[in-house]
Image (tube, rainbow, N blue to C red):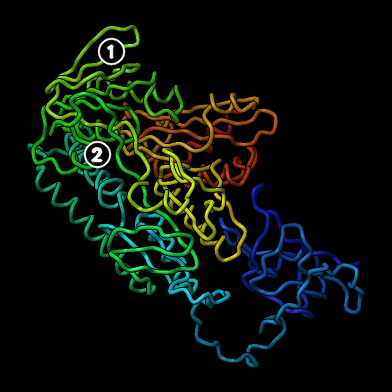
Amino acid sequence: MATEVLMPRQGQSVESCIIIEWKVAEGDTVTTGQALCEVETDKATFEVEATADGTVLGIFYPADADVEVLKVIAVIGAPGEDISNLRPADAIAAAKPETGNVKPEEKAAPAPAAAPAPVAKVSTGAQYDIIIIGAGPGGYEMAERAAHKGQKVLLVEKKYLGGVCLNWGCIPTKTLLNSAKHYVHAKEAPEFGVTTGDVSFDLPKVMAWKQDVIETLRGGIAGMMKKNKVEVLYGEAKLLGSRKVEVAGTVYEGDNVVIATGGSPFVPPIPGADQPHVMTSKEILSVEEMPKSLAVIGGGVIGVEFASFFSSLGVKVDIIEMLDEIIPFMDNGQAQAFRKALKGKVNFNLGCRVTAIDGHDVKYTTKSGEEKSVNADIVLMSVGRAPNLSGMGFEEAGLDFDRRGIKADDQMRTNLPNVYAIGDVTGKSQLAHSATRMGEVALNTILGKKDCFRTNAIPWAVYSIPEIAGCGMTEEQAKEAGHNVESAQLPLIMSGRFLAENGKKGPGSVKVVIDSDTRALLGVHAFGAYCSEFIWGAAALIESGLRVEDVQEIVFPHPTVGEVIRSTMFQF
């Protein structure tokens, strides 16, 4: 009896897979476990193996076909068997590759690799296939991927390639924090048997290194655009409708327009917020002298990172946060443990509302109504970010948006035909890697490939000292969503590497949240050194819908800090 070969399901959210290439041809003899074809999803590439010995009687879909999961893609059986009733209605004859039973000496020399074939489309006479407004991570990475697939792309940028992330956000802050970590490690070196002399922090040199990093990466992006023949245009863009964009008086037309204009620091109307020593995350990246004291208004990611940077260098730091806990999407128990790790370095004033900035005095009211103040050389305003929406013709063009951002569906489509929005400007997820993924979803949608932006497993990280990271639901969120919840937690000091490199007092832990009925992972949360580097693995586990028992069967390298995730699985 013939054996059907099905397109396997790779994770609960995967609806189809693309066949990259067939490794066998009809008529070939195969054995159980032999690779038949290579397929890909938006998450991984893998091989489909033969589930029986026999002859390949039919291959129903060619390379590049996008096939729904659990459909029959091939049949294995005995020569001469009738398989007509097994052929899917939408089956397409597969091109026979030069594999299988062809003798090596009969094979032709391999042809040189071809450039990616352009996607077939109806010509509209437009100058470009895609016009992208904004060259942050979402914009420039989408431009590179689109051009690689044969699209003609115009990338419009107001100032610098890389956007806020590269120039005034992710990269400069991580560069400063790395210098601070070197300083801290040098101070703590004697504990690990390394004797150092006087350790100092040279702020001008650190700032010069920060700028060097920024310019190096800018150059790398420019080279990437040139290599892929992406046309880069500097200037302020104005949307004129579904297909037209104006820059410096010239109108450019594209079959599709993608808005990736990002966001900017939000400054609330607090009296005194307009003073020169009151800064946002942009200005504070260029301070020329180290302050003796810093007041941070807002205990979110940006506020905590800058508080960590300055406090590690001996600056007196106060955080004033309106909510009852820092970083609202962080596990509450770990947030408390993190604050304990910074005790004596950062003063946390939670549940407090800032009322005014009188000179260098930041006045605030506690939850009980008591009026207090802190004095600081610099005040950092870090209460969040707002989408960049004004001055670009969005309202005149009829684009649907509000103060939270441009309204886009899960394929990043707006209410205007052929206009997409990605990244911070949508208000969906203010993370650089989310913007990149949104750009990929928009591109796939433009090219006719099924895709959607999912938010159930987006990892996040705070690059403080110690680091914080998480993915999926916290225990509180899982209960609110109606799950029966179990959780388990282990300290990072269980890792031999963590102990060796951070000492017995090194703070940190991993917490895993599961659905007690299905045993599926719902969330993984961590704080401590290196957790930003292993949290991607938690995203893969959650996205794939794995259960506790599935993760227990995965081999993690030893000694690593990330293996504490696996150890925690055995606590259930």
Q: Which mark is residue 281?
A: 2
Asked whether the beta carbons under mark 1 and mark 2 sit within 8 Å of each other, the answer is no
Quadrant housing residue 531: top left
Q: Residue at x 49, y 52 (%)?
A: 438
Q: Which mark is residue 365?
A: 1
Residue 351 % position (x, y): 35, 16
Kind of residue at badge 1: Thr
Q: Quadrant of the C terminus?
A: top right
Q: Residue at x 18, y 22 (%)?
A: 357
Residue nearest the observer in this picture, 47 or 219: 219
What amino acid does circle 2 point to?
A: Ser
Element type where label 2 sits in the image: loop
**Foreground disc of the pair 1, 2:** 1
Disc 2 packing (10 Å; few <14; some 14–19; many ≥20): some
Question: Quick check: 526 left or right of 119?
Answer: left
Q: Is residue 403 left or right of residue 112?
A: left
Q: Quadrant of residue 430?
A: top left
Q: Position of residue 372 (x, y in %)?
A: 22, 11
The percent coordinates of residue 164 (x first, y second) are 30, 49
Q: Name the residue furthest front.
A: 396
Residue 547 shows up from this direction: yes
Mark 1 Cα-neighbour bin, 10 Å: few <14, some 14–19, many ≥20: some
